[in-house]
Amino acid sequence: MPLRPPPWGRHASIEDGMKSINAWAKQEGYAIVRHRNKMDKRTPPQVRKVLVHCDCAGVYTPANRKKKTRSKKCDCPMKACFTRDLQLGDWFFEVEVSGHNHHPFDPDEGTPAVHRDLDEDTIRTIYN
């Protein structure tokens, strides 16, 4: 079964958009992460575009390490972006490449970090 891309649409902020898109992606078995921001050339500079991709994007480059690690990177081509509407101030989400080259994540092997719900006590424990 191919993984379906997130729906296109408008969002009030990048944070709202990422939550909405990742809620969709979680049901499909993948996660969306930020890749980079593109800035306006105006003064003061503002973010005008946020590029996002599947969390399996990129190519794993093994390094000579003592500890054996693994990666879920498989050069997944799925790409999308949020573009800021200058008149309305909201963000428009559009998918540029909708295909994935991997299966949905397996819950037995762990959940992508984007989908982990940490309570405040756990967050305090991690950062203190």
Image (cartoon, rainbow, N blue to C red):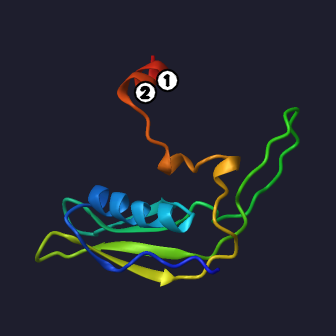
Label 1 Cα crowd, 10 Å radius (few <14 / some 14-19 / many 20+): few
Nearer to me, 95 or 36: 95
Label 2 Cα crowd, 10 Å radius (few <14 / some 14-19 / many 20+): few
**Residue 14, picture quadrant:** bottom left
**Which x, y percent locates residue 118?**
43, 35
Kind of residue sitting beneath label 2: Ile
Instruction: Tell me if residue 13 comes above or below residue 83 in the rendering.
Output: above
For label 2, the SS is helix
Q: Which residue is mark 2?
A: 123
Tell me which residue sits at (59%, 48%) in the image: 111
Tell me which residue sits at (70%, 60%) in the image: 73
**Which x, y percent locates residue 84?**
25, 72
Q: Is 94 on the left-hand or right-hand side of 33?
A: left
Nearer to me, 117 or 96: 117
Q: Work out how far the residue at label 2 is from the one at label 1, CA to CA, in angstroms.
A: 5 Å
> What label does residue 126 carry, if any?
1
**Residue 81, picture quadrant:** bottom left
**Which x, y percent locates residue 10?**
24, 75
Tell me which residue sits at (49%, 23%) in the image: 126
Q: Is 16 on the left-hand or right-hand side of 61?
A: left
How many numbered tags mark residues here? 2
Kind of residue sitting beneath label 1: Ile
> What label does residue 7 carry, if any?
none
Task: For the C terminus, give its image quadrant.
Answer: top left
Tags 2 and 1 touching, CB below 8 Å: yes
Farthest-out residue, top: 128
